[in-house]
Image (cartoon, rainbow, N blue to C red):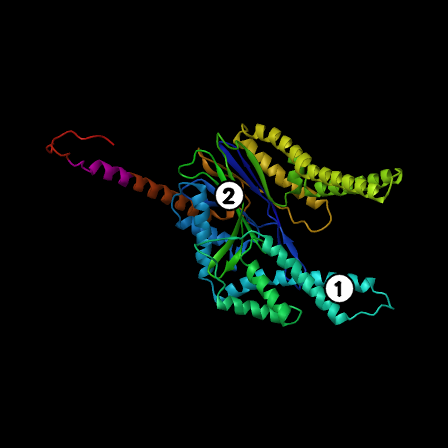
Amino acid sequence: MTAEIAILNKSAIALAADSAVTIGTSDQEDKTYDSADKLFELCRHDPIGIMVYNGLSFAEAPLQSLIKRFRNECGRFDSVKEAAFQFLRHLNDFGVSSPDRVKDDGIRRLAMPIIDQIFKRFQADLQKRLMDHKPQEEIDWAATTNDMLDTAIDVWDRIYKRRKDAEFIGEGPVVISEHIEQELVSLVANHSPGNEAQKARILAILKLALRKDLLSGGYTGIVIAGFGKKELFPTLLSFEIDGMVGDRLKYVVRNETDIDRDGPRAAIIPFAQRDMVDRFLYGLDDQIERYLTQFSQSTITKVREAIIGHISFEDDDDKKGFEEAVQDAEEAYISGLKTGAFEEIKKKSRSEIESLIEFMPKPELAKMAEALVNLTSIKKRVSRGMDTVGGPIDVAVISEAEGFVWVKRKHYFPSELNPRYLHRVGQAVCQEDNNAHHAKSSAGSSRKGRKTPARKGEGAGGASRGN
């Protein structure tokens, strides 16, 4: 996991990302390092940056390398949205060209968590039934376990059927090829409990889930932000991708923020571990909301029971009607708390902060972005569990005026010991500037040398209209 922040106003975007990365396998202890790169320049010709979180590789290749290749090959973009989807197509092309083993591993990575979810639900129900079992009670355990597995399958079948369809790079419906189906059949046969009919239902759920927007724990978050060639104000898009389904990259759009005079004029957007940032910005986070909701539900239930215990009713129907009316009022209160009170608190707090961010200078945007990431890092450091946020914080500011500018950037090597590296970078920048200047000069010469054809009725020396 990680903590990343994007702060936008009309003049610039500040991006900040920590450096913690957790590496582990299913049979070994996890290890955390604080030297990962998660913030990069996406395009050399337009001021556009990219941050990545959660998974830092794609099709078993480092995303850092794929980003660099895209940066070296891409041209100019009219908009950030165009650049973002071009980068997704770049990933899709790389995924299509991957070896079959890599593609098969990707399908297994998508499918195995679903089988595990069904099995864990079945195990939990079975354990509860065993704990409730009395010695004198006679039970047909074969039939009972069969029914419990059917129930677990029903639960996840309903969950996936209610989910929205995921998006895929390319056009047309996603086709589950015969090769993919055979891979899924093998997974179900080797890892799924139940009889043949139940395994067939689990197979159908896997095929359905591959098309839905629920992602596995190995997803990769991608944040792309900056200015396109035709954009005066900044734009941010964020995606979560979850590997390839056949020859199609699966993705979900999580955020699309377009700063404008008629739309939002400023925004603070946290990614990955966002609880401390939400608490700072809104005074609330998901955990506090959950605790307040649970406390309110428990308290009003006790109040209802105490009131009913002190009221005399004419008959049972009168009591039942009163209880139903009070329960309806309780549900309306909890619903209002979730959709009304909490949202109003967030809206007011967000409005106060964003009204200041709208006019915040670029240096202050950078300082605030770094401080919010550092806030999450400190919270993780003094909390139980692994330090999943930490290390040096990379900060960049992107503006129409100065382009992509590093404010803070870590290096794993001292610059004074690597003059050749700095020389190579300087040469590459100079070559880019020369190429851009040459292209601009060539375009200007072409326009000057182009003769305007004479209009009908005019000779070669007739008047021509300017462009």
Place residue 228 in its image quadrant.
Answer: top left
In-front residue for pair 75/315: 315
- The 10 Å Cα crowd at callout 1, few under 14, some 14 to 19, many 20 or more, is some
Vertical side of 76 occupied by 167: above or below: below
Disc 2 secondary structure class: strand
Q: Check whether the beta carbons of the residues at disc 1 and disc 2 lie within 8 A of each other.
A: no
Residue 24 in picture, x, y percent from top left: 63, 59
Split into 4 quadrants, where in the image is the C terminus? top left
Q: Can residue 467 be found in the magenta stretch? A: no
Residue 392 in picture, x, y percent from top left: 60, 44
Residue 237's mark? 2
In-front residue for pair 467/383: 467
Kind of residue at disc 1: Leu
Residue in the image at 65% along x and 71% along y: 195
Disc 1 secondary structure class: helix
Residue 420 is at least partly visible in this image: no
Q: Circle 1 is placed at which residue position?
A: 126
- The 10 Å Cα crowd at callout 2, few under 14, some 14 to 19, many 20 or more, is many
Q: Can residue 446 be found in the magenta stretch? A: yes
| Magenta span dominant secondary structure | helix
Labels 1 and 2: the sequence-earlier one? 1
Vertical side of 129 occupied by 262: above or below: above
Whole-angstrom CA distance, mark 1 to mark 2, is 44 Å
In-front residue for pair 239/179: 179
Residue range highlighted in magenta: 441-453
Place residue 119 in its image quadrant.
Answer: bottom right
Kind of residue at disc 2: Leu
In-front residue for pair 154/189: 154
